[in-house]
Amino acid sequence: MRNRENKARPVIATASAAAAFLLAGHIYLHLGDYTAERGLAALVQMAGICAAFGAMVFLILETTRDALERIFPGD
């Protein structure tokens, strides 16, 4: 049995964080008036949505990497 590393690669973590920040920027640019009008509650909601989106991107990329490593083993 080969020794598998369970840590995520930094590229995947960076890509998921970038996706979350891009979504936050998109929401802020298109709903800036809404978030400014609603105050802190809207900003917290936006942060939660963006964090969930980043986690989803992380899960998809990590699962894809794992599946490709099982199909095409590098060893």
Image: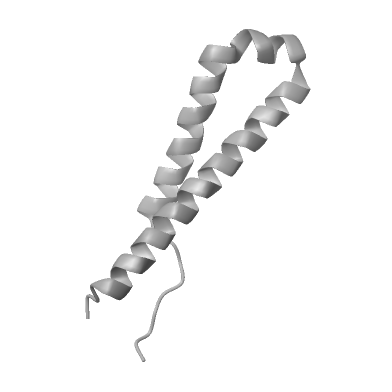
Image x and y of residue 15, in percent? 40, 44
Residue shown at 59% from the left, 14% from the top: 31
Q: How many marks?
A: 0
Residue 53 percent across, percent down from the top left: 54, 40
Residue 61 vertical placement versus 21 (above, below): below
40 vs 74, left or right, is right
The C terminus lies in which quarter of the figure?
Answer: bottom left
20 over 4 or under it: above or below? above
Which residue is depicted at the point 53% across and 13% down? 30
Q: Residue at x 76, y 22 (%)?
A: 40
Q: Quadrant of residue 16?
A: top left
Task: Give x and y (percent) for residue 68.
Answer: 30, 66
Q: Which residue is located at x 38 percent, y 84 percent?
A: 3
Image quadrant containing the N terminus: bottom left
In the current view of this chain or complex, which residue is farthest to the bottom?
1
Q: Which colouring convention does the figure follow?
A: one colour
